[in-house]
Amino acid sequence: MNKKILLCSNILWTITQFRLGLIKALVDAGYEVVCVADTDDFSVLSETKIADAGARFIRLVMNRKGTNPFSDLRYLFKLKKIIKLEKPVIVINYTIKPVIYGSISARLLHIPSLAVTTGLGFVFNSNNLLTRITRLLYKFSLRFPSKVFFLNTDDREIFLHNRIIPNEKASLLPSEGIDTEYYQPIPTSPKDRDFTFLLIARLLWEKGVGEYAEAARILRSDNTINARFMLIGYIDSDNPGGISKTQIQQWSDEGIIEYCGTAEDIRNIISESDCVVLPSYYREGVPRTLLEAASMAKPIITTDNVGCREVIDDGINGFICKTKDSTNLSEVMRRMIRLTPEKREKMGQSGRNKILNQFDERIVINIYLKEIEQALNIRSNYL
């Protein structure tokens, strides 16, 4: 029996960053896994990771930000051709365009599919022509997958409220999962050093990076506080909401922020921090950086925003700050500094327990395996 599964996403990095554990589990379960995505700046390393996991990679060029319908039609036809040639038993689609066009392609070829919405981004933040068309495409294409997974309850409720999918098709996936053995607490020796905050994110304004910088400026003006404000993330200069290199350099030159570029393995950086901050107002799925930090028993500060609220229990494993409010963020960060080390350690352990109980990737993988088996059984009965 053919046991090939095709995963389709926008860029390869998202597959290796969020779904490598799933790929390994599928391979261990006897499936052949094929990953279809476009390349990016990190593709050489990503392709090595895919091969080491026992999967194959097929490049499919996609204009992620383009709105040209002819470009999207080309993408649809090329994706359909790949699926036809590979003959998978099921297709799993991620991110907006692959979810829409991958679902349609699989349906045209009478192949079961699953769709995973990984955060809604701009689609429901405005009501212009592009977003209305995208919603219509969602409504049409999502008739075809056997199940549509959401990473948080807010996104699920939006789709149900707008009648894009029926209730019985919508399911929650507790994030994309986190490898809690890889991201586990690293013992550090007590050091006589400044309190260290850390923000890890793609450098977009909507991630709250500007608010973080301004909060740092406020706290640095207080002579009673000794703190460092670290920033790690990819400068996405092609994104309209991206923060420029010039702005990052300006913050660094002022001594407000310590920008550390990007890092393939951030565990040691997290372990050396005292608190991880993400004051995001972006429509997150579930922010992976918060999962990583909490899994490593670090207290967190984040907003009561879509996706972020899934990870934070205010006063238990961290604190909630207001969105787009650098003054409030500085007050919450000051509150974190003034906690005793024992209270911060207790917060961190509460966060670790939350991740183990709700977001461990083994929980997510079991949901996938069960849903794949069910979809294949339905197909078998149909045939």
Image: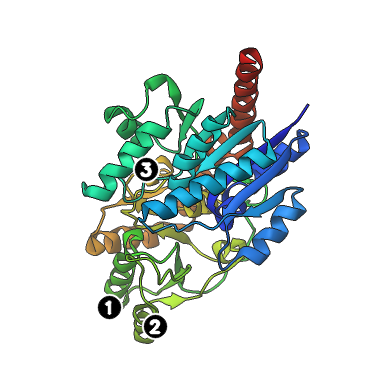
Crowding at dot 3, Cα within 10 Å, few <14 / some 14-19 / many 20+, comes out as: some
* Image location of residue 191, percent across then percent down: 56, 71
* Disc marking residue 309: 3
Residue 280 sits in quarter? bottom left
The three-letter amino acid code for the residue at tag 3 is Arg
Q: Which corner quadrant holds the N terminus?
A: top right
Q: Residue furthest top?
A: 381
Distance from disc 3 to disc 1, alpha carbons, whole Å, reads 30 Å
Q: Considering the numbered disc 1 on the image, is that residue within a helix, a strand or a loop?
A: loop
As drawn, is 88 to the left or to the right of 306? right
* Image location of residue 247, percent across then percent down: 34, 79
The residue indicated by pointer 1 is 221
Residue 81 sits in quarter? top right
Residue 218 against residue 378 in the figure, above or below: below
The residue indicated by pointer 2 is 249
Crowding at dot 1, Cα within 10 Å, few <14 / some 14-19 / many 20+, comes out as: few
How is colour applied across the structure in the image?
A: rainbow
* Image location of residue 256, percent across then percent down: 36, 78
